[in-house]
Image (tube, grey):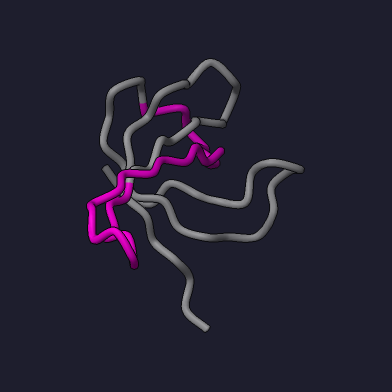
């Protein structure tokens, strides 16, 4: 099974080697046929602390780094 890759925006970078990424997705409601926007925050591992608030990043599923961190930053 391949690993998921998501695109999002960095909303928090205060913690050491960790960023919080906000991922938004749009989908069509099955019955009402309206476009719905949903968002979710993911904690991602940033080894060198090089990403700052407002950056667009790609994250990939990885081994658990901690209780909350199961994603890793791959590129800008």
Asked whether, in this view, residue 46 is left or right of residue 66, the answer is left
* Residue at image location 28% in from the left, 23% down from the top: 54
Q: The magenta stretch spans which residues?
A: 25-51
Return the residue found at the far top.
14
* Residue at image location 31% in from the left, 44% down from the top: 37
Q: Nearer the viewer, residue 24 or 45?
A: 24
Percent x, y of residue 53:
35, 20
The image quarter in which residue 9 lies: top left
Return the residue found at the far front.
32
The quarter in which the C terminus is drawn is top left
* Residue at image location 32% in from the left, 60% down from the top: 29
The image quarter in which residue 4 lies: bottom left
Residue 53, above or below 24:
above
Asked whether, in this view, residue 67 is left or right of residue 49, the answer is right
Q: Nearer the viewer, residue 15 or 48?
A: 15
Q: Nearer the viewer, residue 29 or 44?
A: 29
Residue 29, above or below 11:
below
Percent x, y of residue 58:
33, 49
């Amino acid at each position: 099974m391949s690993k998921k890759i998501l695109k999002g925006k960095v909303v928090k970078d205060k913690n050491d080697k960790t960023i919080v990424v906000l991922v938004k997705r749009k989908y069509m409601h099955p019955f009402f046929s309206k476009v719905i926007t949903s968002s979710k925050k993911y904690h991602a591992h940033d080894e060198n602390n090089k990403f700052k608030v407002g950056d667009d990043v790609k994250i990939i599923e990885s081994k658990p780094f901690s209780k909350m961190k199961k994603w890793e930053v791959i590129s800008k």
